[in-house]
Image: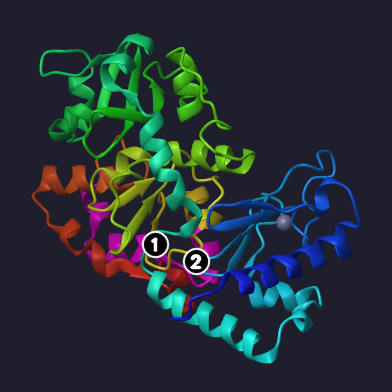
Amino acid sequence: MTEFTKEFKTKIYNSVQDILTNVHVRGGRTTIKDMRGRLTFACPYCGDSFEDEHKKRGNLFFDTLKYHCFNDGCKKHTTLSTLLKDFGVSDNLSSSERLDIIEYIKSNSIEYGNKTSNLEYHLFEKLYELAVPIDMFYIHTKSKPITKDSEGYNILKERLLTNRLDEFSIGYNRLLILNLTPDKKKVIGYQIRILNKNTKNKYLSFSIEKLRSQCNLPTPYEELGLTDIDAERLNKLSTLFNIMGVDFTRDITLFEGPIDSKFMKNSLGLASVNRELSMFDDIPNIRHFFDNDKAGKLAMIELLREGKTVFMWNKFIEDFNLNAYKPKNLDIIKDLNNVIQICYNNKLNAFKYINNYFTNSSFDLINI
Ligand SMILES: [Zn+2]
């Protein structure tokens, strides 16, 4: 693999500087921040923020030479060579240097392809550092662990989750779903389910910063060497359930919510289906398992059109004739939890074949 010399990095830095001066002309938006392993700067594609010229949401990562903009309205994702070409500064480099870059990007996309996206990795350590010890969590969220005799046990029993009691807590009409560190000793974020059904806003998510402030703990981003963008990413990661426990070298299944993710190995749970998914763009082995309702299906159809891997609800339900077993109180088989319940109550083994029902072929649109 090509190793980049300091001199070559300087050349890349200068080329980016040329782009920024061309696009943003002058002021705070033309300056580059040299972070460990990457450069951050105002995105030349979207212009980044027009209210705040110090916002730098464009990131160029040295380990992969890939560029990513974290501005939600832009989310540009490309390689260094394309970035240079798009803004007409590739001429700063000799043709052999340009080839080196292309080779480097190629070799690293294969090598890093199955690892965690470099977009997040440097934040994991910080997340662990900031995580709140579980005892402190109980005190400040006014919640208690769930035990066999306590409130909340029956809810989890009905959902076939009694083997994972330690991933929940209960208090004042609220079920708390915890996002834990792998040793289960600390909490990085959580979601509340209000148990009173009349409440409209049923799900509330708490990021690491919100959680810490609940516990009267500051979150000193600057002291930790984190930029505003890092802070935003860190908070997003903290409400991505099981993010600390997932193995990025294997297939990862991405669910809409934290509960479903508990029924499948190596999976992640989003806090909501409407969540921005660009953070997964670099991870090719992600499979999307959203709910079998309108919002979930529309999201999966969109993802399939982009070539992503999604779950085929229609085909799965039909192949195992699951609707015939659907309990009366259920309008549709909506999520994996429903599937597991139906299988359990009717002694079916359909869930064992779930892995065969993922597709990335657009011919399968009808099967979703
Ligand atoms: Zn942008």
- Image quarter hosting the C terminus: bottom left
Quadrant of residue 348 within the rendered picture: bottom left
Q: Picture coordinates of residue 103 (x, y %)?
A: 52, 85
Q: Image check: 354 left or right of 343?
A: right
Report the side of 76 relative to 164 (left or right).
right
> Spatial distance from mark 2 to mark 1, Cα to Cα?
21 Å
Residue 206 in sight here: no
x 88%, y 65%: residue: 22
Furthest residue toward right: 25
For the residue pair 344 and 15, the one nearer the viewer reads as 15
Residue type beneath disc 2: Asp
| Crowd tier of the residue under label 1, counting other residues whose Cα lies within 10 Å: few below 14, some 14–19, many 20 or above | many
Q: Nearer the viewer, residue 328 or 15?
A: 15
Residue 286: mark in rendering: 1
> Viewed as shown, does residue 245 lie left or right of 230?
left
Residue matched to label 2: 63
Q: Amino acid at mark 1?
A: Ile
Secondary structure beneath dot 1 equals strand
Q: Splitting the image into 4 quarters, where does residue 89 fall?
A: bottom right
**Residue at 17%, 36% in the rendered image:** 160
Q: Position of residue 241 (x, y in %)?
A: 36, 40
The nearer-to-camera label among 2 and 1 is 2
* Quadrant including the N terminus: bottom left
Q: Residue furthest bottom?
A: 95
Residue 145, can we see it? yes
Q: Nearer the viewer, residue 167 or 37?
A: 37
Query: Whereabouts is ligand 1, in terms of quadrant?
Result: bottom right
The answer to if 317 sits in the magenta stretch is: yes
Q: Which residues are magenta?
A: 300-326
- Decide whether residue 89 is among the magenta residues: no
